[in-house]
Image (spheres, rainbow, N blue to C red):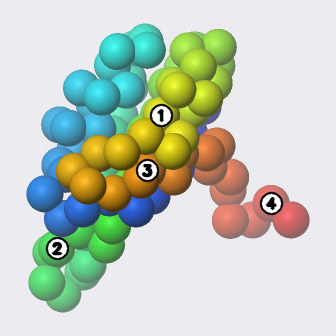
Amino acid sequence: MNIFVGRLTHAITDLHLELLFGHFGQVDKARIVTDRVTGESRGFGFVEMKNEREAVKAINKLDGVKLENTILRVKPAYDRTEN
């Protein structure tokens, strides 16, 4: 399952996301989306977890949690072509 993680500070890295979500199960991939020109974080990222039950638990536990003085927005990520 692909998970959207928003409202991230620029201090958060891919490794931070992997460790945070790793508390709930196996993380296949974690990445912060960066600006193509500056390379700086755009304030959101994605986490991939194979086990859907673990992913749903992570979403439920982490959405609305305060991290680095901001409130995280965590929800399932959907393919842009879906609508």
**Pick the front one: 64 or 31:** 64
Q: Quadrant of residue 80?
A: bottom right
Q: Is residue 4 above or below residue 25?
A: below
First in residue order: circle 1 vs circle 4: 1
Name the residue beneath numbered marker 3: 72
Instruction: Please name the amino acid that badge 1 sits on.
Output: Leu
Instruction: Please name the amino acid that badge 3 sits on.
Output: Leu
Q: CA distance from mark 1 to mark 4?
A: 25 Å
Q: Residues within 10 Å of mark 4 (few under 14, many from 20)?
A: few
Q: CA distance from mark 4 to mark 3?
A: 24 Å
Name the residue beneath numbered marker 1: 62
| Quadrant where the image shows the C terminus | bottom right
Which of discs 4 and 3 lies nearer the camera? The answer is 3
Q: Is residue 21 above or below residue 30?
A: above
Instruction: Please name the amino acid that badge 2 sits on.
Output: Glu
Q: CA distance from mark 2 to mark 1?
A: 23 Å
Which of discs 2 and 1 lies nearer the camera? The answer is 1
Name the residue beneath numbered marker 4: 82
